[in-house]
Image: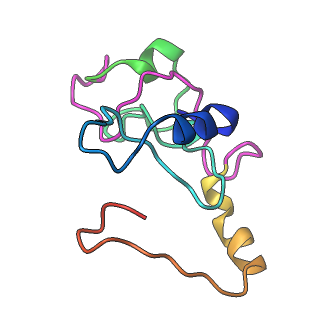
Amino acid sequence: GISGDALESFIHTYDLESPDVRLDRSYWMCIFAVDEHVSICGDCWDCRGGASWSSASYAANPCLFCRKDKFNPCACGTQKYPTGHLLSQVDKFHLVMARIRKLLVALDPDLKML
């Protein structure tokens, strides 16, 4: 993904409103700063069942074991951590939400863009 200085540079370099600018990638944006790469990308929801995989197994699409297309394919190959693991992040949303008093999320009419 793109973040930090690289994201800021991208925003300042391109006129994102111009019809000539085409973004050929999509990115996850988590307002809670959760790293989705340690949670869901490249995982096979059909067959992994919590087993440890190599980076190549996470990066492959379709799945090397069941040969089905993955729901969130990603070539990063990052190790995934199950719910309850110290390094898991998505299972801690309730802790973040408990600290936030109000939340407003704005979406476009097609529910595609914040």
Q: Is residue 69 above or below residue 59?
A: below
Magenta-tinted stretch: 63-88
Q: Is residue 69 magenta?
A: yes
Q: Is residue 67 magenta?
A: yes
* Point 71% across, 46% down: residue: 85
Q: Is residue 85 above or below residue 93?
A: above
Q: Is residue 55 above or below residue 17?
A: above
* Point 62% across, 44% down: residue: 35
* Point 65% across, 60% down: residue: 32
Query: Can you tell which quarter of the image residue 3 is in?
Result: top right
Residue 72, x across and y down, in percent: 35, 39
Q: Is residue 23 above or below residue 57?
A: below
Which residue of the protein is positioned furthest toward the bottom in this rendering?
101
Counting labels gives 0
Q: Is residue 68 left or right of residue 89?
A: left
Q: Is residue 83 left or right of residue 40?
A: right
Of residues 63 and 104, the one drawn nearer to the viewer in this rendering: 104
* Point 25% across, 23% down: residue: 62
Q: Is residue 65 left or right of residue 114?
A: left
Residue 79, x across and y down, in percent: 59, 27
Residue 94, x across and y down, in percent: 67, 72
Most common secondary structure along the magenta stretch:
loop
Residue 91, x across and y down, in percent: 63, 59
Which quadrant is home to the C terminus?
A: bottom left
Of residues 87 and 105, the one drawn nearer to the viewer in this rendering: 105
Q: Is residue 25 left or right of residue 56?
A: left
Of residues 33 and 77, the one drawn nearer to the viewer in this rendering: 33
Tell me the colour scheme of the image.
Answer: rainbow
